[in-house]
Image (cartoon, rainbow, N blue to C red):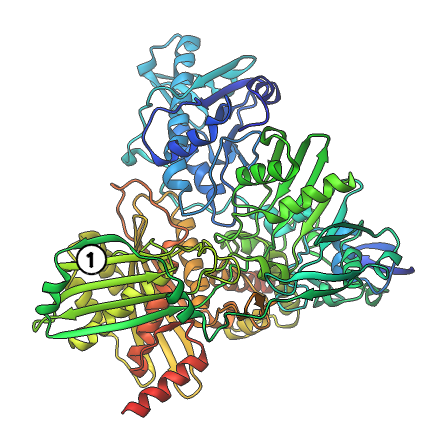
């Protein structure tokens, strides 16, 4: 998929040692399959690293830096295996000409799937350097030791040679065809040690470049006419007033109308002067009808987990439970809106994009311009947050089309309103759970049906003899399901599934008059999950917590793609006002080997802070295809004043290869807060977000019943 | 078109502009100072914060005409002679950012606040920063960084 061929790439890179991944990879890992998928359509190759003759090292990765910190942790992995200082590594990220094919930066997979390949490439490079050094120094290879980009004779440390000298003046290519011997975890000196982020300086001085910060001579800024609602069609348009603005260019092609100007705010002004009338279809679904609608259009479920016999389970139950859990639409709302700058010259295009899928941009732009994907070069500068929302690249396609039409470089940077309008929301979803307890307080059966949240995190990990999980529809929804786009949101599927499962566990614990933590542990054979819960409980002081009026504690745990996480919360609830103030959050996480403990903690903290939003306030308001939230005044994301005391615990499990860390902790936030609210005021919320209105309503209904 | 004279990051600048245009866009495009970010465009998030005569203000809401005769400080002007400001150092030390998009606004809003309040309590910092949004959830570290910077600035002014 690289647009440069091997010869051009090597010419660009100059001399040094380059380690490639061959087009036909040899191994089984999921990431390797992704790489091979990318390479199938071309005879391209993929370089992972280059040791340059000045001793600096290029690390090439198709992954991008969205804030999650792989700019640091991937460098640590390479530094460890190659024996070079971290600060000698230059990260080349998300450049489709230079970097190996990558399906996208999502699903907490960078460390888990890209990491092992990177380590192999580094180990191969190191092996070659040792061979070269043995010849150069005339010392048997076994006597050599590498450290800090230098190889020395153990018996005579004065005898040494730098990597830079070994590669000088030559071009050495190595293909990753055989497995390299990797360092054992016990020998790690860099991986596993906390390290500060390496992108600090540019980010605190305003020098860090994002897609919208790239300036090209003669470039134009575009603002595009948008319909007032999804499904609306343009009835009439009058551009006469806009045309009076000096230097304003209007591009029109059917319903697609754009105002372009050398200044972005003047393009905006021009767009505002375009008078339009739209036909807006009458809204079929609104906030009141969405849940019945989803249940009505839901497809047959597919069973993703089952065991035992639900019938037998029901028969042995002394108490039965049946509840429905609801999740509303949630926006990604990254600080940086979707942005792209495109330059088109003949049949070639260069695109700078804020994206989680640079290679996806390549294909989307190629298709839109009817050119070869090989002729699209995508460059990904720093990305200002993604959270799963920058996987589709409409803005890049729009910029490319306008660049082709105007013959000039064009930037498309969505406004906040456009960002809300075109977002692929975390879907509204419904979960129905039926379950039972026997006379001893053990769970007898578990019948779980999830509608449109998705499969991830749906199956239960509790030890229940008879259970069944069926999944109806995916997070993409599909035709006739949602009135706008939905998709992957940080920990897709798992936020809703964890809310339902962990709320329902609490509800049964309460019916069994059991402590919610004990109840969980009693139903867990999985030692890893027990350990995560125990460590969270110790840090939280679970057993010593003294509840007071309006104060409560809660617990929730989750297995997100192999990372185990438990969160405990202390909340204060004003049941009159419906306000929840989260006082304290403890998060314990077992993600296997941790590359950068500091980075891992930052991701966990970020998950907890961000998760306060979908739990308490974040909900996209809509009427049919019209998105009523247009900015942060009505769509409230967690501000400083919501910040609880946060403590993170990294559960030591270095025997397990690294799992993902960017998403798992957020999946517990809905459930842990719902459970803590219940503990505080004995009222259970079955719908997220738990806004003050919903809490007040639940309190009133519950006092009405008493 | 009119003339707007300002002192930008310590240097006099004369602009010939439409004075109604918002400072944010003049900074980002006309002056190529892209460290000041667009996020909401309505003064709701603080990402475009700059200092105008020492006051933290949202540049997306300020017509450029209003800075005539004033001093404007953007994130690019905070480090002096290659020396980082204590806030910038503290943000790096505490890893008080992730994606970095809100960072310039966070730092400049904190700067404006610390000019007025040299001995802030935690609650005062939280209150002062509450209108600056961060989506990555770096809040606890941003708070720590501001506390560290406040201490260092106090030391320096002794």
Quarter of the rendering containing residue A128: top left
Left or right: A344 as drawn, with respect to A669:
right
Residue at 35% across, 76% down = A685
Q: Residue at x 69, y 65 (%)?
A: A278
Q: As drawn, is A316 to the left or to the right of A518?
A: left
- Looking at this rendering, what residue extends furthest in the right direction? B2
In terms of image quadrants, where is residue B149?
bottom right
User: Residue tagged by mark 1?
Assistant: A530
Q: In x, y percent, where is residue A176?
A: 40, 21
Q: Position of residue A198 (x, y in %)?
A: 52, 43
**A647 above or below A576?**
above
- Mark 1 residue element: helix
Q: Position of residue B50 (x, y in %)?
A: 70, 62
Q: Quadrant of residue A407?
A: top right
Residue B86 horizontal/vertical position (percent): 60, 56
Residue drawn at 48 percent across, 52 percent down = A388
* B147 in relation to A408, above or below: below
Q: Quadrant of the C terminus of chain A?
A: bottom left
Residue A210 visible, this orientation? no
- The reply to whether residue A248 is visible in this rendering is yes
Q: Nearest the camera: A254 or A226? A: A254
Q: Is disc 1 surrounded by few (<14), some (14 to 19) or many (20+) residues within 10 Å? A: many
Q: Viewed as shown, does residue B19 lie left or right of A334? A: right
């Amino acid at each position: 998929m690289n647009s440069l061929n091997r010869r051009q790439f090597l010419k660009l890179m100059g001399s040094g040692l380059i380690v490639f991944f061959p087009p036909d990879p040899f191994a089984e890992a999921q990431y390797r399959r992704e790489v091979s998928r990318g390479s199938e359509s071309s005879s391209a190759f993929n370089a992972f690293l280059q040791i340059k003759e000045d001793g600096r090292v290029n690390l090439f990765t198709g992954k991008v830096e969205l804030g999650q910190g792989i700019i640091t942790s991937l460098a640590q992995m390479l530094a460890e295996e190659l024996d070079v200082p971290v600060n000698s590594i230059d990260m080349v990220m998300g450049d489709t000409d230079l970097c190996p094919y990558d399906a996208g930066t999502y699903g907490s997979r960078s460390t888990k799937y890209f990491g092992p390949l990177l380590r192999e490439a580094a180990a191969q490079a190191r092996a070659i350097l040792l061979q070269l050094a043995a010849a150069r120094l005339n010392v048997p290879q076994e006597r050599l030791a590498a450290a800090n980009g230098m190889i020395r004779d153990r018996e005579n440390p004065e005898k040494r040679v730098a990597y830079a000298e070994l590669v000088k003046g030559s071009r050495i290519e190595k293909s990753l065809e055989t497995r390299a011997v990797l360092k054992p975890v016990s020998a790690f000196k860099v991986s596993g040690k906390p390290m500060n982020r390496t992108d600090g300086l540019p980010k605190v001085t305003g020098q860090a470049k994002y897609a919208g910060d790239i300036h090209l001579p003669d470039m134009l800024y575009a603002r595009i006419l948008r319909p007032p609602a999804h499904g609306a069609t343009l009835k009439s348009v009058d551009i006469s007033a806009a045309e009076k603005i000096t230097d304003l260019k209007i591009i029109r092609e059917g319903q697609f109308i754009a105002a372009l100007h050398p200044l972005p705010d003047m393009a905006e002004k021009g767009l505002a002067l375009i008078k339009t009338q739209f036909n807006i279809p009458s809204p079929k679904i609104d906030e009141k009808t969405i849940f019945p609608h989803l249940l009505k259009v839901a497809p047959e479920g597919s069973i993703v987990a089952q065991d035992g016999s639900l019938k037998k389970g029901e028969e042995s139950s002394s108490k039965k439970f049946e509840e429905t859990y609801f999740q509303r639409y949630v926006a990604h709302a990254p600080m940086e809106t979707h942005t792209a700058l495109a330059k088109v010259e003949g049949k070639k295009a260069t695109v700078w994009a804020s994206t989680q899928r640079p290679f996806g941009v390549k294909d989307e732009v190629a298709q839109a311009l009817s050119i070869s994907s090989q002729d699209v070069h995508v460059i990904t500068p720093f990305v200002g947050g993604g959270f799963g929302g920058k996987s589709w690249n409409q803005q890049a396609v729009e910029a490319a089309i306008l660049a082709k039409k105007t013959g000039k470089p064009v930037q498309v940077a969505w406004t906040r309103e456009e960002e809300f309008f075109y977002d692929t929301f975390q879907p509204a979803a419904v979960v129905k759970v039926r379950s039972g307890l026997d006379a001893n307080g053990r769970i007898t059966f578990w019948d779980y049906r999830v509608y449109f949240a998705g499969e991830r995190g749906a199956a239960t990990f509790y030890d229940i003899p008879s259970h069944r999980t069926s999944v109806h529809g995916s997070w993409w929804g599909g035709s006739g399901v949602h009135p706008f786009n939905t998709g992957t949101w940080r920990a897709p599927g798992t936020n809703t599934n964890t809310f339902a499962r962990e709320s329902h566990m609490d509800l049964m614990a309460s019916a069994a008059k059991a402590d919610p933590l004990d109840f969980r542990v009693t139903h867990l054979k999985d030692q890893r999950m027990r350990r995560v819960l125990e460590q969270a409980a110790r840090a939280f002081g679970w057993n010593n917590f003294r509840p007071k009026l309006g104060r409560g504690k809660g617990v929730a745990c989750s297995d997100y793609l192999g990372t185990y996480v438990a969160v405990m919360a202390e909340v204060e609830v004003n049941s009159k006002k419906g306000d929840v103030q989260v006082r304290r959050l403890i998060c314990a996480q077992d993600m296997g080997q941790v590359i950068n403990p500091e980075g891992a903690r930052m991701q966990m903290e970020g998950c907890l802070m961000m998760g306060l939003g979908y739990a308490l306030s974040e909900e996209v308001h809509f009427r049919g295809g019209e998105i009523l939230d247009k900015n942060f005044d009505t769509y409230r994301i967690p501000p400083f004043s919501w910040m609880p005391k946060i403590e993170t615990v990294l559960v030591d499990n270095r025997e397990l290869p690294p799992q993902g860390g960017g998403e798992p902790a957020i999946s517990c936030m809905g459930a842990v807060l719902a459970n803590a609210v219940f503990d505080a005021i004995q009222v259970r919320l079955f719908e997220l977000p738990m806004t003050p209105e919903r809490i007040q309503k639940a309190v009133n209904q519950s006092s009405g019943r008493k | 078109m009119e003339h707007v004279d300002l002192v930008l990051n310590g240097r006099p600048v004369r602009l010939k502009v439409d004075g109604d245009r918002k400072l944010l866009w003049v900074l980002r495009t006309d002056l190529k100072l892209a460290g000041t970010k667009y996020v909401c465009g309505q003064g709701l998030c603080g990402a475009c914060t700059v200092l105008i005569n020492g006051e933290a203000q949202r540049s997306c809401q300020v017509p450029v005409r209003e800075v005539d005769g004033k001093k404007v400080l953007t994130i690019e002007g905070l480090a002096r002679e290659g020396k980082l400001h204590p806030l910038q150092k503290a943000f790096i030390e505490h890893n008080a950012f992730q994606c970095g998009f809100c960072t310039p606004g966070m730092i400049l809003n904190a700067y404006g606040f610390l000019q007025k309040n040299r001995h802030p309590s935690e609650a005062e910092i939280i209150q002062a920063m509450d209108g600056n949004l961060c989506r990555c959830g770096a809040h606890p570290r941003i708070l720590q960084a501001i506390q560290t910077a406040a201490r260092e600035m106090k030391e320096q002014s002794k």
